[in-house]
Image: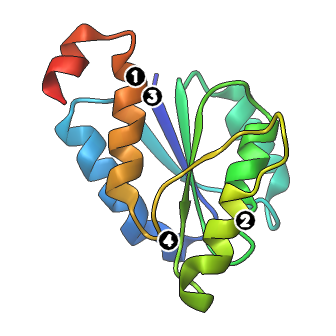
Amino acid sequence: MAEVLVLLGSESDMPIANKVKEELDKLGISNEVKVASAHRTPDLVDKLVKESDAKVFIGIAGLSAALPGVIASKTKKPVIGVPVNAKLGGLDALLSIAQMPPGVPVAAVGIDNGKNAAVLAARILALLDKNLEKKI
């Protein structure tokens, strides 16, 4: 079972996902990385979220950056969005992730900042894991 499921909207976002994975691995947090697009493969996103035992989700997406919000609409677990600098310096993606409607929260980290997404996931998990809290 992965404690953190990382979903990225496109294979081109893999360098950012690798930063997330590297940080989670360093902290000993089990994780899984999958490519699933909110627009191109919505059924796969739905299946991955609903079947996951993950405690925290990280959605990495650029352009419209719908993926983190779609994930949040399918779970009550924490979702962290990582905006990708695909166009407009990533500002479009950042605003899409930060401007979620009431009741569908997504935590947003800085543009292309996969490492901070991993650290935030670790802090969330550390609320119930004193050993992890000591590591971070």
The disc labelled 4 sits on which kind of residue?
Answer: Asp
Residue 60 or residue 31, whichever sits in front:
60
Determine whether the residue tagged by mark 1 lies in a helix, strand or loop. Answer: helix
Please name the residue that numbered disc 3 is placed on: 2
Q: What residue do we see at 18% from left, 40% from top?
A: 26
Q: Residues within 10 Å of mark 4 (few under 14, many from 20)?
A: many
State the separation of the CA atoms marked 2 and 4. 17 Å
State the separation of the CA atoms marked 2 and 3. 27 Å
Please name the residue that numbered disc 2 is placed on: 96
**Sooner in the amino-acid sequence: mark 4 or mark 3:** 3
Q: Is residue 61 left or right of residue 103?
A: left
**Sooner in the amino-acid sequence: mark 4 or mark 1:** 4
Q: Residues within 10 Å of mark 2 (few under 14, many from 20)?
A: many
Label annotation for residue 125 = 1
| Closer to the eye: label 1 or 3 | 1
The disc labelled 3 sits on which kind of residue?
Answer: Ala
The disc labelled 1 sits on which kind of residue?
Answer: Leu
| Image coords of residue 94 (percent x, y) | 61, 68
Please name the residue that numbered disc 4 is placed on: 13
**Sooner in the amino-acid sequence: mark 1 or mark 3:** 3
The disc labelled 2 sits on which kind of residue?
Answer: Ser
**Sooner in the amino-acid sequence: mark 2 or mark 4:** 4
